[in-house]
Image: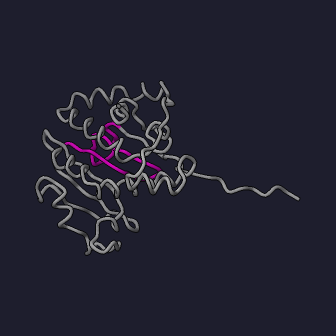
Amino acid sequence: MGKTSRPTTTGMRQFLDLEQQRDWIAGRIDLPDAGDRSESLEQRFKYVARFERLLSRSQAGEVLEILGLYGPSCIPLLRKTERYYWSVSCLPSSSDKPLVRVNASWMELFTLYAHGDDIRARFIVHLSDFTIDRSATPSRVDKSFLEQSVAMPEDVSYLFPRGADIFGINVCGSVSIRKLLDSRRVVRAIRTFNLTHMNRGRNAYQASHCYSVADYMLAD
């Protein structure tokens, strides 16, 4: 008789069972991360010039501070999963000209752009986490909640990217981005979406990971 092959555990299930994932999403547990980072010096040097260009921008301070809030709040086991399950790109060469972009699997999670001397953000989440009835129906978006979650109602808008149950939230201004990230409901939704894609397997954007930017996401 031949050997029976066992199903391979992929994604975040290698590190966290489903109950631990649910507890982390709900904020019921803190996850013990790796003490050290597994780092490639070649990869770090590859993007040093881009990072220096980012630092020369007037928005650099706010970008790095916002990433310092987003990383620990919204990505599980930051050190253990860095680059291979999530990554952050610095000044990626895409047509929308972002300053930084966080990805997992094949999906964009979070992007920061210049907005005058300030910044704006795009969060990608599940639509059903932001509707009145938990459906994935665009007409049921909870506009009141979104407007109350930022400094000024006009600071938030949204879009419906391709894909089932996908929702994009645009937020203008660092003050409103910080306020949005202070909402428990929003953070739960971001965690849920991020884990969905980290569970899909290895990150497709490993080659564009910028360790110099990630330093600010992992800072204690």
In the picture, residue 149 is in which quadrant?
Answer: bottom left
In the picture, residue 174 is in which quadrant?
Answer: top left
Q: What stretch is highlighted in magenta?
A: 90-114
Q: Is 76 in front, or is 56? A: 76
Q: Where is residue 185 in the image (x, y as percent from the top left)?
A: 29, 58
Q: Is 98 in front, or is 192? A: 192
Q: Position of residue 34 (x, y in %)?
A: 49, 34
The way the protein has been coloured in the rendering is one colour
Q: Is 22 in front, or is 176? A: 22
158 within the magenta span: no
| Number of numbered discs overlaid on the protein picture | 0
Q: Position of residue 120 (x, y in %)?
A: 20, 47
112 within the magenta span: yes
- The C terminus - image quarter: top left
Residue at the right extreme, as displayed: 1
- The residue depicted at 33 percent of the width and 56 percent of the height is 124
Left or right of residue 54: residue 87:
right
Q: Is 91 in front, or is 141? A: 141
- The residue depicted at 10 percent of the width and 55 percent of the height is 152
Left or right of residue 100: residue 156:
left
- The N terminus - image quarter: bottom right
- The residue depicted at 28 percent of the width and 70 percent of the height is 131
Q: Position of residue 88 (x, y in %)?
A: 38, 40
